[in-house]
């Protein structure tokens, strides 16, 4: 069991019978879905809300019941990965391109458990490019306004084509190098016309589970 698997396995221990569970997107969340699927096969009854079409497909293959977010009034536990985690449990997310739905689901959750390998823990956010979801109309102008905040920007691509999110938008990756004040930057970015949402998750995580390569885990809450 590697670091990602260890963190995912530990997170699923917090899921109880009858819960509504948010399922994140990405390589670490994938393992949480697999382990949850095993528990469902053993009789655990849960309902899940997926943060992407990809996650919904994986969950259904694992026998997990999926509903739309608007079909429930809250989510008990949301389990998702992160690209970076700082000492205050602030996150950079969106490497998998699902940051908008991930943030909506996290905000609707009573508990937001973040799972990652211990290599994702950093002293300062920003080495990993910050994803910003923007509407396609005038996206170059939007990217120009983002650059004014002190970053180099690049449009997310899939092969030679611009990658389109599940919401029909584009992602601009913003290379800041370091982010000293994530809460301030989150607000500045979201105030730019054309920006839908950004991958800074500030004061949202309630528990962080870091997996180590030897299969042990560290729980921070």
Image (cartoon, grey):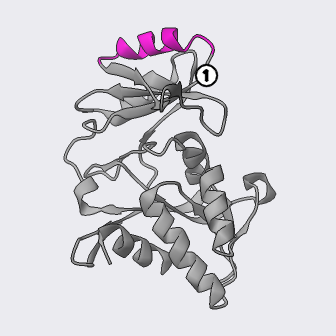
Q: Does residue 86 belong to the magenta stretch?
A: no
Q: How crowded is mark 1: few (under 14 residues within 10 Å), some or many (20 or more)?
A: some
Farthest residue toward the front? Answer: 160
The quadrant in which the C terminus is found is bottom left
Count the numbered circles shown. Answer: 1
Residue 81 x %, y % = 43, 57
Above or below, 174 against 29 in this view is above
124, above or below 218, in the image: above
Q: Which residue is drawn at 27% across and 49% down?
A: 86
- Res 100 quadrant in image: top right
Residue drawn at x 48%, y 26% as measured from the top left: 160
x, y percentage for residue 67?
A: 76, 61
- Per the picture, the main secondary structure of the magenta-coloured stretch is helix
47 or 112, which lies in front?
47
For this rendering, which residue is in front, 112 or 50? 50
Provide residue 9's location: percent of width, then percent of height: 43, 77
Question: Height in image: 183 above or below 43?
Answer: above
Instruction: Say if residue 113 shows up in the picture.
Output: no
Q: What quarter of the picture does the N terminus occupy?
A: bottom left
- Between 139 and 187, the one lying in front of the other is 139
**Would residue 6 appear left or right of 158 to someone viewing this image?**
left
Q: Where is residue 59 in the image (x, y as percent from the top left)?
A: 63, 67
Relative side of 150 to 39, left or right: left
Query: Residue at left 65%, top 83%?
Result: 17
Q: Does the magenta stretch include residue 141?
A: yes
Q: Work out whether residue 31 can be spotted.
A: yes
* Disc 1 target residue: 135
Residue in view at x 38 percent, y 33 percent: 130
Instruction: Name the element at disc 1.
Output: loop
Spot the residue most to the right: 71
Give the residues in magenta: 137-150
């Amino acid at each position: 069991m590697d670091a990602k698997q260890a963190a995912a396995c530990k997170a699923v221990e917090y899921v109880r019978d009858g819960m509504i569970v948010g399922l994140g997107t990405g390589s670490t969340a994938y393992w949480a879905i697999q382990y949850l699927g095993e528990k469902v096969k053993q009789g655990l009854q849960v309902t899940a809300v997926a943060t992407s079409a990809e996650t919904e497909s994986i969950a259904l293959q694992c026998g997990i019941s999926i509903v739309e977010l608007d079909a429930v009034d809250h989510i008990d536990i949301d389990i998702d990965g992160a690209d970076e985690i700082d000492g205050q449990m602030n996150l950079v997310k969106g490497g998998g391109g699902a940051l908008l739905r991930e943030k909506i689901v996290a905000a609707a959750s009573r508990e937001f458990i973040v799972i990652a390998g211990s290599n994702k823990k950093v002293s300062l956010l920003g080495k990993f490019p910050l994803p910003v979801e923007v509407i396609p109309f005038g996206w170059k102008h939007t990217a120009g306004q983002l650059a004014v905040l002190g970053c180099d920007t690049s449009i997310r691509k899939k092969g030679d084509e611009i990658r389109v999110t599940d919401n029909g938008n584009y992602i601009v990756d913003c290379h800041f190098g370091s982010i000293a004040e994530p809460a301030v930057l989150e607000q500045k970015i979201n105030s730019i016309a054309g920006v839908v949402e950004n991958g800074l998750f500030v004061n949202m995580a309630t528990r962080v589970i870091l997996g180590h390569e030897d299969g042990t885990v560290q729980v921070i809450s």
